[in-house]
Image: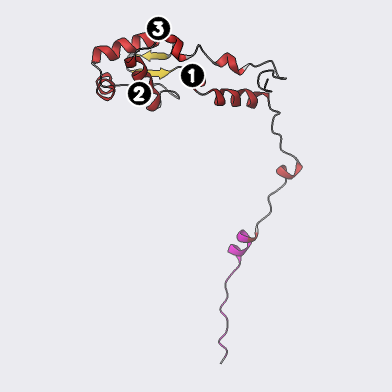
Amino acid sequence: MSAATHSHHGGFDPDSLGMPPVYTLNLSASQRSVLEWLTSHGAVFDPIITDIEEIALDCGASVSTVYEALARLEALHLVENPDPTRYRVSPRYFFASNPEIRRLVGEALDAPEITPDARAQAPRKVGNIAARRRRTIQAVPDQD
C-alpha cells in the first residue's frame, strides 16, 4: 500500500475520491461524447456556459439526444448543472479517470508541510548579474 492510502494526518484515503469504473455505468456513445466534450472544454475546473446546439454539432448528435445525455449524466452525478446554461463535470469523475493524480493528491495531503528555514527568511543577496546592472559605464580615454 502506498503512503497515500494510510495517512498519518487524519486517515485521508485517496480512493474515496473515486467512483465506480465508468464502464460499469453503461453509458451510451452519446453520453460518453457529451461527457468528453464538457471535459475537453474545461468543465472539469469550473462550470462552463454551454450551447446545446454546438455540443450536438460537435458530437454528431441531435439536440434532443444531447439533452437526454445531459439528463442521464446529471442523474448519475457525473455532471453538475448549477444553472440552466452552465455545466460542470464532477471532480470525482476526473479523479476516477486519472488515478495517478488521485494518488498524488493523497500523497500531497500526507506529506509534511514545507517550512522555510532561517536562510529562506534572511534578506536576499544581490546576485552578480544584478550587481553588474548597477555598475556605471565610464568612457575609456583614447590612447594615442
Task: Tell me the SS state at disc 1.
Answer: helix
Counting from the top left corner in percent of width and height, residue 60 is at 25, 21
Counting from the top left corner in percent of width and height, residue 124 is at 68, 50
Q: CA distance from mark 3 to mark 2?
A: 18 Å
Task: Tell me the SS state at disc 3.
Answer: helix
Q: CA distance from mark 3 to mark 1?
A: 15 Å
Tell me the residue at 56%/78% (across/down).
Answer: 139
Q: Residue furthest right?
A: 118
Q: Is residue 136 magenta?
A: yes
- 129 above or below 44? below
Tell me the residue at 66%/56% (across/down).
Answer: 126
- Disc tally is 3
**Circle 1/circle 2 CB separation < 8 Å:** no
Give the residue at mark 2.
Answer: 37
Give the residue at mark 3.
Answer: 75
Residue 81 occupies quadrant: top left
Which is more N-terminal, label 2 or label 3?
A: 2
Tell me the residue at 63%/16% (across/down).
Answer: 13
Is residue 93 found left or right of 29 in the rendered image? right
Is residue 79 found left or right of 51 in the rendered image? right
Which is more N-terminal, label 1 or label 3?
A: 3
Quadrant showing the C terminus: bottom right
